[in-house]
Image: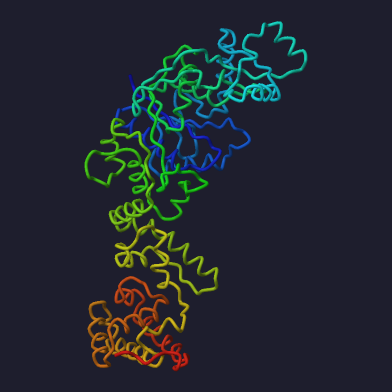
Amino acid sequence: MTTRCRIAPSPTGPLHIGTARTALFNYLFARQTGGTFVLRLEDTDKARSSVTYEQDILDGLHWLGLEWDEGPEVAQRSAGGAFGPYRQSERGALYTEAIERLLAQGKAYPCFCTAEERAADKEADPQLSGYIGRCATLTEAEREARRVEGRESVIRFRVGEGVVEFDDLVRGHVSIDTAQLGGDLVIARSDGSPLYHFVVVVDDMAMGITHVIRGEDHLSNTPKHVLLFRALGAEPPVFAHLPLILNPDRSKMSKRKSQTAIAAYREQGYIPEAFVNHLALLGWSSGDDEDLFSLQDLEQRFDLARVQPSGAVFDAERLDWLNGQWIRRLPEDELTERALPFLVAALDAAAAEGHLVRQPTAEALAPLLPMVIERLPRLDAIGPMLDFVFIDDVELDPASLVPKRWDPATTVTGLTEAARVVEELGQVSFEADELEPPLRALCEVHGWKVGDLFMAVRVAITGRKATPPLFDVMVALGYDTTISRLKAASELASTLPHEDRDAPDT
């Protein structure tokens, strides 16, 4: 039997971490078993579904590299398949036929109970946990009388009595008494539109889904689905319920408490290689000490038997570490291509604030990346690390120019002398390994601590105290720009009142 598994997101919100992890595990299981990975959009919630959310889901799965074998035909990613359509909103006739079949067999019935009647039942018995079956035994004449009264009806599925049992690939044998299911299940609204628990079963049957791999939060729904499969004349698929994804405090991850949207992580400069790697480790273990797995590695090594039932903590620090590791594994041209939009965005923001900005090119960015790659946790950090190279009017805080052990007068001397040393070195010798010796010698002549001069120079040419290696930065800025910024900073430092600072400690 060919394995067929699916991801069935609802386009009522953006693609989030839980759905992405579920999609990944289904994709990996399909690839590992030589099966088929199906994408089905559960878009029957007309009030909340949107084309925007649908596109976000499709784009997110594509960004992660989780290409489906069958699914809705969309621009540039047509898939199709023999079991379509792959949007629930286009499969209404299938649901109508299945409901009519259950009604004809007496496995479902119309329920005319009003909200007030159900509330009265609850008030009469506070221990009541579900529907009491008021309409379950109505005769056809009694039903017709209610229709004549103008009462609307939902359709309920007869849950019956007994125990529902199934084997879960992650949780082992599961046994639940039907008394815990809340009574007969509503499978269609009064307007005839079917509900989730029903359509998901009908679709899984019709599409030949052999394995349903989903989150632990669906475990309590599974007995209802098992009963529906059997009532419709099919054996249920194999189930595997993945562990919950937790915050560091062990609370359930949710959009109210955490950042869950995949698009947000993408915008922050996480790369898909790292994100897939991190998602795979949320509940699955390779069995050894390895941490780095490409999608291709995972396709070969993933095994549902190594998925743990206990909750998996989403560790942002671990994600940052993985992201840095994968960034450093990217080929130089690919890293440049991916990083450039983040640098452009940072410079656009600077331009919007009124700064004079030169737009970077891939050719200009590529030689700068080696300076920062070891300290780059995310691609959005590229802006704060390198934007000063492309901002012509770097803004300086005069007070920040003065190192702790210096006063303004010493700072003016230091920056002026540094500019002189660079000028005398000349443009031909303007290289990182040529710049450091004469500037260190300058410190010896004046009795300055090297760190003080270097800090003053760093702030003068970049506007900040933390940057990539100083001499690499000077080379990146260029001979003329370095000298002009040193001189401009020296003039600015001269405007500071000398009495505001202690005498230098030399």
Left or right: residue 499 compared with residue 436: right
Residue 462 horizontal/vertical position (percent)? 40, 76
Q: Is residue 385 left or right of residue 8?
A: left
Residue 160 or 495: which is nearer the viewer?
160
In x, y percent, where is residue 92?
Answer: 58, 22
The quadrant of the picture occupied by the C terminus is bottom left
- The x and y percentages for residue 369 are 33, 64
Image quadrant holding the N terminus, namely: top left
Quick check: 418 left or right of 261? left
Q: Residue at x 27, y 93 (%)?
A: 446
> Which of the 4 quarters of the picture holds residue 447?
bottom left
Colour basis: rainbow
Q: Residue at x 39, y 27 (%)?
A: 5
Specify the quadrant of the image occupied by residue 12: top right
Q: Quadrant of residue 210?
A: top left
Tell me: residue 342, above or below residue 434. above
Image point 50% across, 22% down: which residue? 180
Image x and y of residue 467, in percent: 36, 72
Q: How many marks?
A: 0
Q: Is residue 447 above or below residue 383?
A: below
Q: Residue at x 49, y 43 (%)?
A: 254
Q: Is residue 394 above or below residue 153?
A: below
- What is the residue that sits farthest to the right in this orientation? 149
